Image (tube, helix red, strand yellow):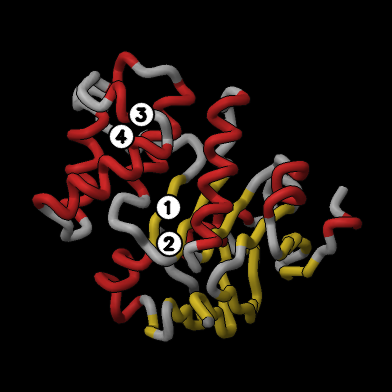
């Protein structure tokens, strides 16, 4: 099943064209690895896909619906963690954070609590659910940020450099979770410089070069 489709997607910054009439589609159950050198537009593409910026031209469809004119559904369908973003509140507990972010997506009460418990247990944060986030290690904060981003069980999860600064344990937990999402027929889009991880867990690998997405085989990922 098609989850994301781009038609003629174009974006310029300061007169420089990053993308010119991109056409692509991502499907259910895939982990799409995005690679490329610094400055080629990986983060820009991520921001286009999650609605932080809009294309200059072209259209984006999410779950068969034109995204820009149906922004509420777009936000419900997508969970995102951006590199370097501080998406959790340090003075709240882990549980308070995830309940809060669930509420922003329209999930409340017992439904939100049940999903929060499931997610925090998976990320091995349930035993510290009542502790303030300011006491957490960087890896724990990153895991909580991901937990909050998918607290509403989105069908599409977008991750920009999710392992940056993580310890080995947190990276292992993250990889396991990404693979479990694909098995649940969700779509994961993973932008990362960690080419070993991209090669290990991705079902499709796309390299951004000169404003074009090129399919790359795992054997040719360098």
Q: In this view, does 122 lie to the left or right of 134?
A: right
Q: What element carries label 3?
A: loop
* Sequence-earlier tag: 2 or 3: 2
Q: Name the residue under label 4.
A: 88
Q: Residues within 10 Å of mark 1 (few under 14, many from 20)?
A: many
* Sequence-earlier tag: 4 or 3: 4
* Sequence-earlier tag: 1 or 4: 1
Are the residues flagged by discs 2 and 1 in contact, CB closer than 8 Å?
yes
Q: Is mark 1 on a helix, strand or loop?
A: strand
Q: Residues within 10 Å of mark 4 (few under 14, many from 20)?
A: many
Q: In this view, does 132 lie to the left or right of 27?
A: left
Q: Residue 50 carries which label?
A: 2
Residue farthest left in this picture: 109
Q: Name the residue under label 1.
A: 80
Q: How far apart are marks 2 and 3 (CA)?
A: 26 Å
The image quadrant that residue 168 belongs to is: top right
Q: Distance between the residues labelled 4 and 3?
A: 14 Å
Q: Is residue 40 left or right of residue 163?
A: right
């Amino acid at each position: 099943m098609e989850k994301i489709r781009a038609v003629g997607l174009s974006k310029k910054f300061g007169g420089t064209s990053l993308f010119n009439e991109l056409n692509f589609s991502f499907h259910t159950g895939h982990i799409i690895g995005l690679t490329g050198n610094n400055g080629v537009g990986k983060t820009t593409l991520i921001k286009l896909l999650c609605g932080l910026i809009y294309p200059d031209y072209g259209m984006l469809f999410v779950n068969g619906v034109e995204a820009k004119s149906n922004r509420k559904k777009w936000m419900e369908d997508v969970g995102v963690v951006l590199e370097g973003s501080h998406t959790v509140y340090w003075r709240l507990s882990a549980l308070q954070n995830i309940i809060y972010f669930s509420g922003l997506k329209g999930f409340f009460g017992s439904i939100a609590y049940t999903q929060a418990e499931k997610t925090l247990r998976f990320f091995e944060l349930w035993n510290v659910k009542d502790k303030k986030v300011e006491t957490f290690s960087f890896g724990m904060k990153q895991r909580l940020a991901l937990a909050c981003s998918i607290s509403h069980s989105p069908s599409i999860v977008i991750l920009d450099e999710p392992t940056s600064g993580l310890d080995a344990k947190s990276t292992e937990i993250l990889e396991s979770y990404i693979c479990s999402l694909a098995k649940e027929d969700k779509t994961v889009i993973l932008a990362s410089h960690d080419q070993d991880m991209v090669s290990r867990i991705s079902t499709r690998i796309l390299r951004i070069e000169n404003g074009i997405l090129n399919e790359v085989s795992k054997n040719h990922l360098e």
